[in-house]
Image: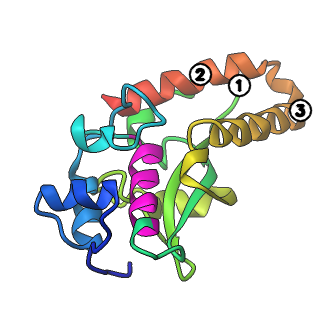
Amino acid sequence: MIDFELTSNEPYSDSFRNKGINSFKEACDYIAQLPYGRNANREDFSLVLSEAKGTCSSKHALLSELALENSHPEIELIAGIFLMNEETHSKLTGFFEDKPYSNIPECHCYLRYNGERFDYTDTSNGLERIIPRLVREQRIDPNQVSDWKVMIHKHYLEGWLSRNPAFQLTLDDIWKDREEAIALLSK
């Protein structure tokens, strides 16, 4: 990932500098160290810093906003849909045993620079397990993580369900299963 000094006087840059973080790389490393967890308000990316946790969406939206504040629009925020299963997340071992499917499409946010993908959700480098199972990628703006990301995810799930009628599941059914899987990953 490109590195640069945080020279902007905008709010996110100020917040990072107040924590002694003065470069984009330092900010990325700091964010990756924070635990995974949903914030009180998914539209307020500053909560990643004040609550000291975040999701793939909130963490990467914050970093994308930080890059934009410092005149680096070439750092793209990406919503990627991949087929999540036990191979991508070992915590899901056994989760699919009683399901009519062996994976579930999940939407993951990360950054892309010069065609290379970067994931600061945590320090596990889980993106390496996800990349081979990516089925769709779309650049989004940070303000789209709270609504647009969910919309494109549900749209993809609807298509997936229509291509797999044998599952006999509704969108609500699969979304409930997805939430159960995410809860397992959060433990």
Q: Amino acid at mark 1?
A: Pro
Residue 138 screen position, x and y as percent = 68, 59
- The stretch in magenta equals 55-68
Q: Are marks 1 and 3 in contact (CB under 8 Å)?
A: no
Residue beneath the point at 54% across and 83% down: 114
Q: Amino acid at mark 3?
A: Ser
Q: Quadrant of the N terminus?
A: bottom left
Q: Which residue is mark 2?
A: 177
Q: Are marks 2 and 3 in contact (CB under 8 Å)?
A: no
Residue 162 marker: 3
Residue 121 screen position, x and y as percent = 36, 51
Location of residue 132 with respect to 157 vertically, above or below: below
Q: Which residue is mark 1?
A: 100
Residue 66 forms part of the magenta stretch = yes
Q: Quadrant of the C terminus?
A: top left
Q: CA distance from mark 1 to mark 3?
A: 14 Å
Task: Work out whether mark 1 precedes mark 3 in sequence or the reverse, and give the earlier one.
Answer: 1
